[in-house]
């Protein structure tokens, strides 16, 4: 042991040597006094610099000793063992050992062999958060895979239930029956089925920048493809009101497609038949 520890939990050289002895280790004053000696240092002294320059030995930080002792206490009912070295344990690493030591942790430096502390876990989780660029790349990759699987399913004549309503943008119209509890339950179930089936749900027919329910922003790009009414028996006045609203939106943007106006039965039957039924 060539130096004590740095950092908030300081231990001097003598304290570290005592810890090693108490836990069954032996102390040598030179790196050549015995085979397989472990060299410990946490700062660059003349002796440490000389050993590092020779590049004959790895120089390990004292936190490896402390981690070994802590893990042994955690695993007190198991056989004792020395922890494999991790990048955080290394003051100096010989080139030929870099890959070996790096393989003892994952890409976020989470150890494969020891229990990390709460402070370490927070650092690991913070590092695991993807950046905006990574999220964008992941979205692109997911989209490519989804398109490939969807195309294959289409060619084989099967549609996975999770994609039955894929590509549809659905608005559930609140009718005069909306206060009825049985209707509310039926509408809720229909909405969850369409969401599970890949549809986007919007809560307004008007084009604006407000948020739709859940995951959707209402905009020109997701103007409803389907408007769901309570039943095929919905009043003519109610349907006429919906068509009037749609017509007003189309006057403001000629590029909008006319949405289908269908009943909840269309969703229920499509789900039952495992295929999108004709809207007419």
Image (cartoon, grey):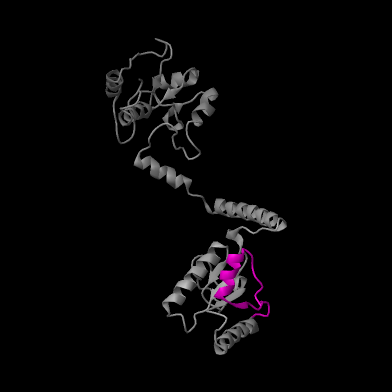
Magenta span includes 257: yes
Q: Which residues are magenta?
A: 253-280
Image-based side of 267 in relation to 93, left or right: right
Image quarter where the N terminus lies is top left
127, above or below 112, in the image: below
Quadrant for residue 198, please give it. Answer: bottom right
Front position in the image: 179 or 206: 179
Residue occupying image coordinates x 49% and y 28%? 101
Pick whichever, 202 or 188, lies toward us: 188
Q: Position of residue 16 (x, y in %)?
A: 30, 23
Q: Quadrant of the C terminus?
A: bottom right
Residue at the right extreme, as displayed? 155
State left or right for residue 263 relative to residue 31. Answer: right
Q: Residue furthest bottom?
A: 237
- Measured as percent of width and height from the top left, residue 238 is found at 54, 86
Q: Nearer the viewer, residue 130 or 212?
A: 212
């Amino acid at each position: 042991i060539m130096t004590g520890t740095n950092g908030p939990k300081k231990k001097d050289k003598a304290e570290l040597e005592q810890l090693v002895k108490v836990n069954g280790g032996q102390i040598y004053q030179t790196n050549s006094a015995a085979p397989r000696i472990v060299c410990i240092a946490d700062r660059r002294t003349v002796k440490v610099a000389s050993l590092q320059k020779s590049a004959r030995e790895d120089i390990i930080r004292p936190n490896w000793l402390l981690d070994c002792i802590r893990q042994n206490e955690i695993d007190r009912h198991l056989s004792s063992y020395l922890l494999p070295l991790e990048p955080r344990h290394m003051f100096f690493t010989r080139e030929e050992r870099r890959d070996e030591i790096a393989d003892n942790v994952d890409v976020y430096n989470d150890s494969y062999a020891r229990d990390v502390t709460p402070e370490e876990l927070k650092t690991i989780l913070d590092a695991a958060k993807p950046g905006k660029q990574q999220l964008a790349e992941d979205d692109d990759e997911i989209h490519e895979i989804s398109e490939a699987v969807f195309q294959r399913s289409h060619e084989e004549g099967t549609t996975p239930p999770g994609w039955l309503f894929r590509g549809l943008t659905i608005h559930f119209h609140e009718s005069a029956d909306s206060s009825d509890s049985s209707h509310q339950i039926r509408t809720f179930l229909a909405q969850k089925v369409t969401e599970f089936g890949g549809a986007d749900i919007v809560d307004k027919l008007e084009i604006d920048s407000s948020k739709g329910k859940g995951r959707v922003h209402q905009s020109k790009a997701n103007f409803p493809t389907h408007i769901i009414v309570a039943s095929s028996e919905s009043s003519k006045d109610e349907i006429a009101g919906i068509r009037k609203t749609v017509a007003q939106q189309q006057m403001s943007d000629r590029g909008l497609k006319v949405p289908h106006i269908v009943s909840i039965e269309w969703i229920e039957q499509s789900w039952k038949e495992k295929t999108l039924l004709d809207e007419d």
